[in-house]
Image (cartoon, rainbow, N blue to C red):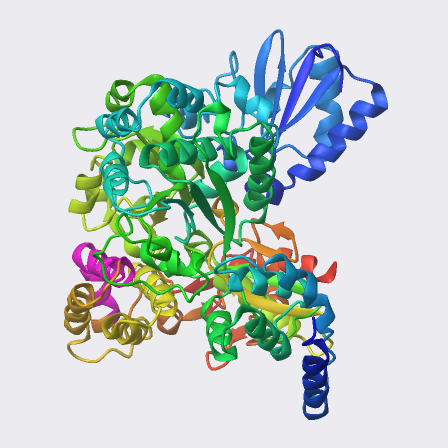
Amino acid sequence: MGKKSSSGAASKRRSKKQPGPAEVDLGLLNPILDKYQDERGAIIPMLQEAQGVYGYLPRSVIERIAEAGGAAPSQVYGIATFYAQFRLQPVGQHVIRVCHGTACHVNGAERISETIENVLGIKEGATTPDGKFTLLTVVCLGCCSLAPVMMINEETYGRLTANKVKTILKSY
Amino acid sequence: MNTKAAATTIKVGLGSCGVAAGARKVLEALEQEIKGNGADVDLKVTGCIGMCFREPLIEVSNTNGSVIYGDVTPDRVPVILEEHVKQGKPVAKWIVHGEGYPRPDDSFLAKQYRIVLRNCGIIDPENIDEYIQRNGYSALPTVLRDWSPERVIDTITRSGLRGRGGAGFPTGQKWSFTRRAVGTPKYVVCNGDEGDPGAFMDRSVLESDPHAVIEGMLIAGYAIGASEGFMYVRAEYPLAIHRLNIALDQSRKRGYIGKNILGSGYSFDIKLKQGAGAFVCGEETALIASVEGRRGMPRLRPPFPAVSGLWGKPTNINNVETFANVPWIILNGAEAFAALGTEKSKGTKVFALAGKTARGGLVEVPMGITLREIVNDIGGGTITGRPVKAVQMGGPSGGCIPTSLMDTKVDYEEVTRTGAIMGSGGMIVLDESTCMVDVAKFFLNFTQRESCGKCTFCRIGTRRMLEILTRISEGKSRPGDVDLLGDLAQKVKLASLCGLGQTAPNPVLTTLRYFRDEYDAHVNEKRCPAVVCRALLTVEIDPEKCTGCGACKRACPVSAISGEKKKPHTIDPAVCTRCKICYETCKFDAISVR
């Protein structure tokens, strides 16, 4: 990968401008880029796997994937912002996904979100200042019979009430 | 595992619902206990049995028959093992279904007819041999050895199978279009981008019986002359993806997928693609764009994908449930399938029963059954005990069917006549505590967010509709708003390119049609009859009944309640968000919400 040094330099340049999560090790992308080298229409899986590695899609990663896929960074950015799965900001240690599907909605999902917002002091989409929790809303987790439902990381919690949510949050 | 068959088999349902309800902990407890006391038990894992409302579920079978235990917790495990397995005395009080144990939940299963769900909750989805033991991968060799592609298409056509993803297009006809289309290679795509909030049957089938879908795709590929298939599954379904990957590997190793399948000369490979979260990708041209790695935006049809689909080649797209029907039809014959259902809607349909239903879960029923039978007999009415107010069918593209139409037969044409659609099969039961304006607003909020933005009427029209609904729900409606809403709904329907925009107004149109009085109450009286729309609510404490216990004060998330101990409390309406938490906390019935 001869391009490695130049994109490494690019990320260093940016790290001066934006402090924080700019230390992106683009080397971690190489196995993904190699895997999809010869596959048509692989930008979405590349972005998915990259997000699996970095937790989100840093700008330098989008640029590197664009370069590898022979697309303009704007095109890849367009794809990344079209699909709900992709995040352009880093997320907290624990990601909370509150289901707002139909069954959850009619069974009080709004109140569940509100309770979490009150307990954590953040709004939907935000991350707590200590980086512990990110609060997201999702459309349907497909566990409609257990509504209202939320997921924290990979764990699903069902038949929620405001009190149950408070107890669950305390356990993290 | 024992070499000889154990005296008792215990199956643990590990679908997503089961896992969410704690089935993994039950499985761990079983593993430990069995190891600990050396019980002669063959412990197995299976998918979704369908009785989601009783999860976690385990099935215990021995020579005396089999029973299903519901609401199983780890501390019930030792009791079941001791009494049922060791002493041979089933723990009757925890049994939810089983021969010799009549239970109220029996009616949940009694009216069902399982074709698509034939193996769900019975086989271990991660073990191909269990699928094979249930006649799996026997339709494929039959077809490859003895049937011409034309015969396959003719059989599917005669069976009357229609697309289960929502639109209900005849499957055999679709296959025949793709077969006749000029161009190679041809592709088969399985649409597993189950985006309707409230529908989870495709997830369940993929998690519980992945090989049935794979076999269906292989047969479709043979029939239309395709060489490659794609399974497009939502990334939000990690368990389904995990099990599909296992199934694809196993199937490949046994030679059902790959080159020269079973020596027939037919080659077919299947790749798994993960959807990245866009409702519009359920639309076939948008799905194709997404598989090609682009933004999932639909395009004008024709040309239909059958003629020009993936990378411009003839492509056949069917949904998960449709494919799962195919091997059964080949093995049992078109006539057996066509014997079920109504004149134009044959076979069965799987519904995801949820909302205020007493028994939520997956049900598969013959077409033509009435809504009343599904909601009352299978679903057991409402969990709240309040009367059913409506049934929402078809998700954001569907509509609300009122109780007066509960005798509607479940059939593509009959459901469409009500203004709803069959859709993928989400069925949300609504009771009198559900506000129909709020339901319409909920769906519009969804569709306006999910609109890809290509068509103006869908992009902006749905947003304007949502604004009007928001005004109505907040008591800020302007004169003529309801008529404007109806007018806009018609125009969005007419001027949108794809199914998303064309059907997005359905929740509004059906609620306007059947629940106009509720809109009027919001608009004219600034009142929400179902006591849902917060801006219109008044929350008050009755000083006569309030004991001043302070429970509401402690529960209030915004500190809107004040009062001294043992003296009546009051709510500051300026701070109160009308979340009703205090109302639910009060043990003295002192708080009223109007």
In the image: residue B6, left or right of residue B420:
right
- Taking the magenta stretch, the answer to whether it contains residue B190 is no
In the image: residue A90, left or right of residue B301:
right
Per the picture, the main secondary structure of the magenta-coloured stretch is helix
The answer to which of A147 and A140 lies nearer the viewer is A140
In the image: residue B185, left or right of residue B336:
right
| Count of labels in the image | 0
Q: For residue A26, what is the image quadrant?
A: bottom right
Q: Measured from the top left, where is residue B261 in percent x and y? A: 49, 28
Q: Measured from the top left, where is residue B337 in percent x and y? A: 29, 23
Residue found at the far top of this picture: B63
The answer to which of B461 and B322 lies nearer the viewer is B322
Q: Which residues are magenta?
A: B499-522
- Tell me the quadrant of the picture where the C terminus of chain B can be found: bottom left
Vertical side of A145 occupied by A10: above or below = below
The answer to which of B17 and B374 lies nearer the viewer is B17
- Tell me the quadrant of the picture where the N terminus of chain B can be found: top right
The answer to which of B63 and B191 lies nearer the viewer is B191
Vertical side of B29 occupied by B232: above or below = below
Q: For residue B15, what is the image quadrant?
A: top right
Q: Measured from the top left, where is residue A55 in percent x and y? A: 66, 67
Q: For residue B84, what is the image quadrant?
A: top right
- Taking the magenta stretch, the answer to whether it contains residue B502 is yes
Vertical side of B429 occupied by B278: above or below = below
In the image: residue A41, left or right of residue B42:
left
Residue B565 visible, this orientation? no
Residue found at the far right of this picture: B36
Vertical side of B377 occupied by B534: above or below = below
In the image, what residue occupies the spot 30% across and 24% down? Answer: B148
Q: Measured from the top left, where is residue B108 in percent x and y? A: 42, 28
In the image, what residue occupies the spot 53% across and 28% down? Answer: B121
Residue B311 visible, this orientation? yes
